[in-house]
Image (cartoon, rainbow, N blue to C red):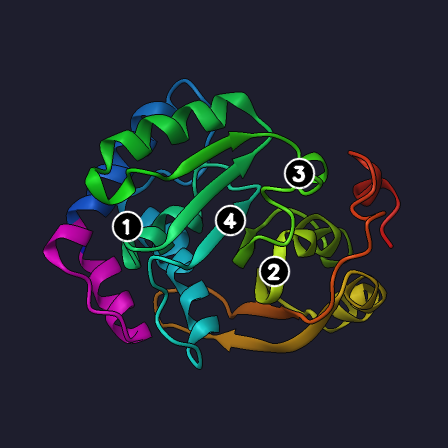
Amino acid sequence: MERLISGARELGFQLTPHQVEQFETYYQELIQWNERVNLTSIVDYEEVQIKHFLDSLTVALALEDDPPPSASFHVIDVGTGAGMPGIPFKILYPDVRLVLLDSVGKKTSFLRHVVAKLGPDFIGVEVLTARAENLARENEHREAYDLVLSRAVAELPTLVELTLPFCKIGGVFVAQKKGPIEEEIREAQKAIDLLGGLLRGVKRIKLGDLPEEHLLVVIEKVTPTPSRYPRRAGIPVKRPL
């Protein structure tokens, strides 16, 4: 895990031997399950360290002006797939409360397996098989999270509708993006306003190990999301706000 260790250090994070061991376990389980469940096209040991694990850790940079996450800090990873960025974030900050959400049962089966393998730090991590549009309407989850994460799920106008309903007032949604983002942000501004968000900023991340510039779009929740959002399943993708 040398590439991950050095990259994390460049980001300002000193991984402990225990954390490195957790990442190693995560990698081994990911590769084994990937032989029968389509979880990732990236399987090379060094590439997973850089393009999955290190890339996931960059979301923590969006919180650099905030206090370190504690046991009262509630995180949901929407459309988590194979568990990124949620699981790496939890490895980095083991005290946070984490929910991993995906609509594909085969992926959530893997997540439950790997969460069990990652040891006591991951006791209490919740894995849910559901559509974001449906879960965000449940009282337990609506406006309940300090941090909402999403990586490579959808275009920003759609993504805002799928994620901001989960954010509590004062919480933030962090979307991981690559390449030119200005037009996508302009197209998402209506959705951000409608759903109670405020664009806090776009953080540009360039690391020697990452092949291209990565972006964190950080949106703060400033007012409640109107009850009519999110719209029913599938509509945010078909008809973005």
In percent of width and height, residue 62 lies at 48, 72
Quarter assignment of residue 241: bottom right
Q: CA distance from mark 2 to mark 3?
A: 14 Å
Lower position in the chain sequence, tag 2 or tag 4: 4
Q: CA distance from mark 2 to mark 4?
A: 12 Å
Q: Nearer the viewer, mark 1 or mark 3?
A: 3
Q: CA distance from mark 4 to mark 1?
A: 27 Å
Q: Nearer the viewer, mark 1 or mark 2?
A: 2
Which label number is shown at residue 76?
A: 4
In percent of width and height, residue 219 lies at 64, 69
Which label number is shown at residue 168?
A: 2
Q: Are marks 2 and 4 in contact (CB under 8 Å)?
A: no
Which label number is shown at residue 79?
A: none
Question: What secondary structure predominates along the stretch shown in magenta?
Answer: helix
Vertical arrangement, residue 216 with respect to residue 204, above or below: above
Magenta range is: 2-20
Lower position in the chain sequence, tag 3 or tag 4: 4
Quarter assignment of residue 43: top left
In percent of width and height, residue 66 lies at 43, 77
Lower position in the chain sequence, tag 1 or tag 2: 1
